[in-house]
Amino acid sequence: MSRLTVTKTNKLFIDGSFVRSESGHTFTVAGERFPRASRKDVRDAVRAARGGYVRWSALTPYNRGQVLYRLAEMLDARRDQLEAGCTGPEEVDRCIDRVVWYAGWPDKLTQVLGSSNAVAGPFLNYTTAEPMGVVGILAPTEPPLEGPLSRLAAVLAGGNAAVVLAGEASAPAAMVLAEGLATSDLPAGAANLLTGPTQETAKVLAAHLDIDALDLDTAADLERLAELERLAAGGVTRVVRQGATEQSLACVAGFVEHKTVWHPRGI
Amino acid sequence: MTEVVARTWDYAAAPESRDAVTISPRYELWIDGEWSAPEAGEYFPTVDPSSEQELAVVAAAGAADIDRAVAAARTAFERGWASDHTGRAHYLYRIARILQTRAREFAVLESLDGGKPIRESRDVDIPLAAAHFFYYAGWADKLEYAFPHGTRTPHGVAAQIIPWNFPLLMLAWKIAPALAAGNTVVLKPAETTPLTALLFCDVVREAGLPAGVVNIITGGGDTGAALVRHPGVEKIAFTGSTEVGREIARAVAGRGTHLTLELGGKAANIVFDDAALDQAIEGIVNGIYFNQGHVCCAGSRLLVQESVQERLIAKLTDRMRRLRVGDPLDKNTDVGAINSRAQLNRISTYVRYGIEDGAEIFQPDCPLPAHGYFHPPTMFTGVTQSHRIAREEIFGPVLAVLSFRTAEEAIAMANNTRYGLSAGVWTEKGSRALAVAQALRAGVIWINTFNKFDPSSPFGGYRESGFGREGGRHGLEPYLQLT
């Protein structure tokens, strides 16, 4: 008699835990069930991210870089599962290389983006690149792994916490990604991953007053982008629009705050 | 405790002469390098807030005028403004030098139209405005050094809307980086303080700038709303209230217009028990009473460590008794006129809220002029974090004092706000100063100083204080498309 396989129950990843949607709803991709995140799940995830931001941003940049590098290691160890959830080995390669690329940024951001400023007076004056806070990500769904992963890696590299709406088609890849995040020593809540249709949840995320920035999928239609940007305006939430496959410093720079510090010089 | 003896001296009046400036009875719009009347023929008055006397009438720009201004800016942009890097640098240097030469004229006009003490417009606003042009002039032909990777392209026509608290300085913060980056501009000064922006048109003329590179249109909120909605505008830079900032962000949603906002604030000024108290007192006074408190980064929340609170408040009340409120043109004046009747009413409302919410008010017994809009320096003690005067921006000379025990508590209180523009830290302990500066969620942190500005120093907010930076290399970025 052949052994019955132990199948995985797919769950949302909120505050470092795997949880069902509080709504109890699911949806199906390729015959597999995934949790359908509700508005309440989005709010729970934002609250978790606020705590995650405090823990993540408190680590040294060197430490954050190592955690991101470990994420690449954890993903590499799950290659087979990732390949099954995306377009294939080439996409997985690109994604893992991208995480490694971003893993090098946390301890270099301020050197590249910051400055020491020669003011006309007896003051030390410097500008540093600081984490912005909690970022809501409406992830591109194509390619299925690269979409959510590219955006998330850039946001984490800036020292921010994230709530990622991964959508429907990306759900299989997002599940494996969540397991990679859960085993990479990322503090609980620094990355939260929600699956399911985003028509309603994206609006809740955009309008939420406790997110600092919103990362929008450039592939979304203009009317939808306009609606989400209008909702984000209520909290003066920064809106960044970037493509799924972009790998650049600009992707991180969009999610840092420049802080300038003055101190008098005198004997 | 040492007994504080309050003594006051009478000063002889020392007014700056108004002769330095000639005000026209009527001002038109500056479009395409010349003055032109508004098509609808409407004008509105601008008054001297210290006397409530009308200074001039100013054109109210309507939709047709905005069309003309944006079209002029577009044409000027396409005529090669963006590619003549050396030319732009030289024009900006000329503007800086002319502003320095005509500084007295600008300072007197600024104080007349806006009510700020001549000491401030003479020593802060005008020199800093000139310095901004001088600083960004040097960037105009060095953009590839500011952003060495990829390409850098100006957006095109920048619509810029500025507030009434630092009229010429805000104009400089907007126009200098925009032009240096190769954009052309349509700028709207605030309704109550248009005169120095209109005098600046004469500087533009004197500097020989190509027509249409700088267009100045005057008007109220409707003019600003129409300008930001104009489809020919590629970049919007706004400084003003958070409420209007939100409206602008909503209006441009989905359009892909580049937007930067510099909005309100409710800055914490944190005094630890080891601070040099006499220096801190000067910093606190400068933080909240500079420019009548009409400062978005004003230190309007004073957080004092409990162990020094009594001593600090005694010194502060004593210092406040020595502030001189009155004629903005008098060189001895510390606190000038409130910018408008509407703003004076707003401040008075908040003072009432403070009393209603149970805080204790202190106002020095200082004589106020019989005419004009004046408000005494005001301090509330016994304020809690839920009080409206501790949460909302008053934009006036009103200080809310709260106390704390530990540094952690002070940081939590300071960050407990929707805003995040600036903050102050007073302590003689270096490690504490740096740790607190790092933990504060604000764009500008002043340690053992306050309200210092410099063209090379990036300025801007976190959260609902807006986004984008002005000043420094960072200040160029909002005016360039980088790839």
Image (spheres, rainbow, N blue to C red):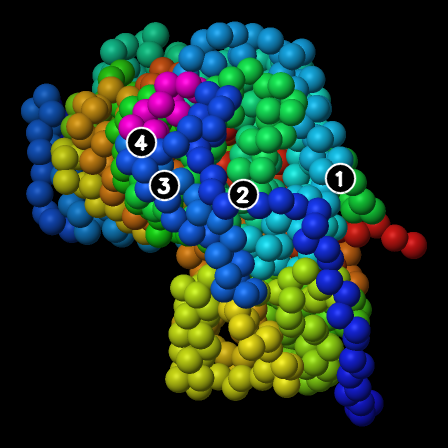
Chain-order first, disc 4 or disc 2: 2
Q: Nearer the viewer, residue B255 or B206?
A: B206
Q: Mark 2: few, some, or many residues within 10 Å (few <14, many ≥20)?
A: few
Which residue is found at the position 66% from the left and 46% from the top?
B21
Please report contact status of discs 4 and 3: CB closer than 8 Å, yes or no. Answer: no
Q: Do tag 3 and tag 2 residues touch (Cβ < 8 Å)?
A: no
Q: Which residues are magenta?
A: B64-73
Three-letter amino acid code at the position of disc 1: Val
The residue shown at (56%, 65%) is B50
Q: With respect to residue A143, does A135 lie above or below?
A: below
Q: Determine crowd level at label 1: few under 14, some 14-19, many 20+ residues with C-alpha closer than 10 A.
A: some
Mark 4, residue position: B39
Q: What kind of residue is marked 4?
A: Glu
* Same chain assignment for discs 1 and 4: no
Rendered location of residue B98, percent (x, y): 71, 31
Q: Which residue is mark 1?
A: A119
Rounded to the nearest angstrom, the CA distance separating label 3 from label 2 is 16 Å
How far apart are the two marked residues, 3 and 1, measured between alpha carbons?
38 Å
Q: Examine the structure image and report whether residue B66 is included in the region drawn in magenta.
A: yes
Q: Is residue A36 visible?
A: yes
Element carrying mark 4? loop
Q: Which residue is mark 2?
A: B24
Question: Please, what secondary structure does the residue beneath circle 2 have?
Answer: loop
Single out the mark in the foreground, 3 or 1: 3
Question: Does A175 lie within the magenta span?
Answer: no
Q: Marks 3 and 2: which is nearer the front?
A: 2
User: Which mark, residue B60?
Assistant: 3
**Residue at screen point 64% across, 62% down:** B328
Task: For marks 1 and 4, give the one nearer the viewer.
Answer: 4
